[in-house]
Image (cartoon, rainbow, N blue to C red):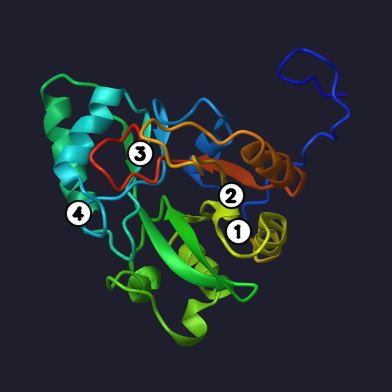
Amino acid sequence: MPVSVDGMRSSRPSPRAPDVGSFSHPLVKVLATVDRHSCPGRFNFHCHTTCSDGSLTPEELAVQAVELGLEHLAVTDHHSHRAYPLVEQTLSTLQRHGQAVPRLWRGVEISAVLKGCLVHILALGYGAEEPLTPYLQGEAVCGEALQAGAVVRAVHGAGGLAALAHPARYRLDFRVLIRAAQGLKFDAVETWYDYDMGSRWRPSPLICDHVDQLRQELGLLASCGTDTHGASLRGR
């Protein structure tokens, strides 16, 4: 029987191993360690720059990531990965000057339709760009390519992981959406998120715990991120 965080015995069933498709991805081991304390100081897999609707330039975001001591970072601008080479270049420069820098993963936030509801999907850690080309043109696609299943197939085709972003922000119940995501072979759910959108990021109590319990029961990995659009990586 599992032991809960306060040391008391828990009746919650042990989560099954995440089903991340037929390929092994190095980011899986990282996401498997994500918990409520991972963001904003260790991991950030959801943030934005001026390459979409953020306030920080890619260079400014990279500097803040280093100042925070981040270990892993993915910049997930909407339908754009133009920030990636700029962040990479800045991190490389800082590293040459003796600073510790986070591991940088490719990322993009993609609009999609899941169960008739408009949602956002985070593509994380992909390599090949060609399968994602329709989703990297600065705006949402139309037609069949807008369906969540098509987006997930494209993310996997690019060698990445697909995560359902902030599942409790949509018009449909998060439990419905997470179960639907699991059925479409999503890899992860953005589990720890600040739904209150404070200036200092913190995971929202109760809702994040419910998301965490469900995603474990369904065998999905956890992700986290500040969803920064403002001037500080410490908050949204």
Q: Which residue is mark 4?
A: 50
Given this view, does label 3 or label 4 mark the residue nearer the observer? 4
| Mark 2 residue element | strand
Q: CA distance from mark 4 to mark 2?
A: 25 Å
Q: Dot 1, how many residues are within 10 Å of its Cα: few (below 14), some (14-19), or many (20+)?
A: many
Q: Taking 167 as reference, is 236 left or right?
A: left
| Gap between marks 3 and 4 measured at Cα | 17 Å
Q: Earlier in the sequence, mark 1 or mark 3?
A: 3
Q: Residues within 10 Å of mark 2 (few under 14, many from 20)?
A: many
Residue 189: which numbered mark, if any? 2
**Residue 228: percent from the left, percent from the top?**
34, 44
Q: Rounded to the nearest whole Å, what is the CA distance between mark 1 and mark 4?
A: 28 Å
Which numbered disc covers residue 73?
3
User: Residue shown at 55%/73% (left/top)?
Assistant: 113
> Vertically, is 96 above or below 121?
above
- As helix, strand or loop, the secondary structure at mark 3 comes to strand
> Distance between the Cα atoms at labels 2 and 1?
8 Å
